Image: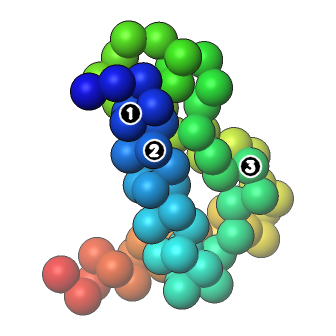
Amino acid sequence: MTSSERVRSTEEAVECLRAALEGAGVALPSLGVDPVTAATGEPYALVELGRCNVRTAVRLADALRGAGEQA
């Protein structure tokens, strides 16, 4: 897998995560591909979740709890 394929794969994962979070009413402004690991030979770059405010953290926790209850 080439470097550009790894980044594209990670970018696709980030976009899927962003869409799922938005569906749960959560926005992580710093969500993205970690540029350092994207430039290395790792099979997949890391996803940078970033920081969020307390209200967003509570919404994220609520969404995760709700998803756990549905399983």
The residue at the point 74 percent across, 49 percent down is: 30
How dense is the environment of label 1, judged by Cα within 10 Å: few (below 14), some, or many (20 and up)?
some
Q: Where is residue 53 shown, x and y percent of the image?
A: 81, 59
Which residue bears the numbered disc 1? 6
Tell me which numbered mark, 2 or 3, is placed earlier along the sequence.
2
Q: What's the distance in space between the residues labelled 2 and 1, CA to CA?
A: 5 Å
Which mark identifies residue 30?
A: 3
Of residues 30 and 60, the one nearer the viewer is 30
25 relative position to 8: left or right: right
Locate residue 27, reporting x and y percent. Answer: 70, 70
- Disc 2, disc 1: CB below 8 Å? yes
Say which quadrant the N terminus sits in. top left
Residue depicted at 63% across the width and 46% down the height: 32
Rounded to the nearest angstrom, the CA distance separating label 2 from label 3 is 18 Å
The residue under label 2 is which amino acid type?
A: Arg
Pointer 2: what residue? Answer: 8
Inspect the image, locate mark 3, and give the three-letter code of the amino acid beneath it.
Ser
Q: Is residue 64 above or below residue 6?
A: below
Q: Nearer the viewer, mark 3 or mark 1?
A: 1
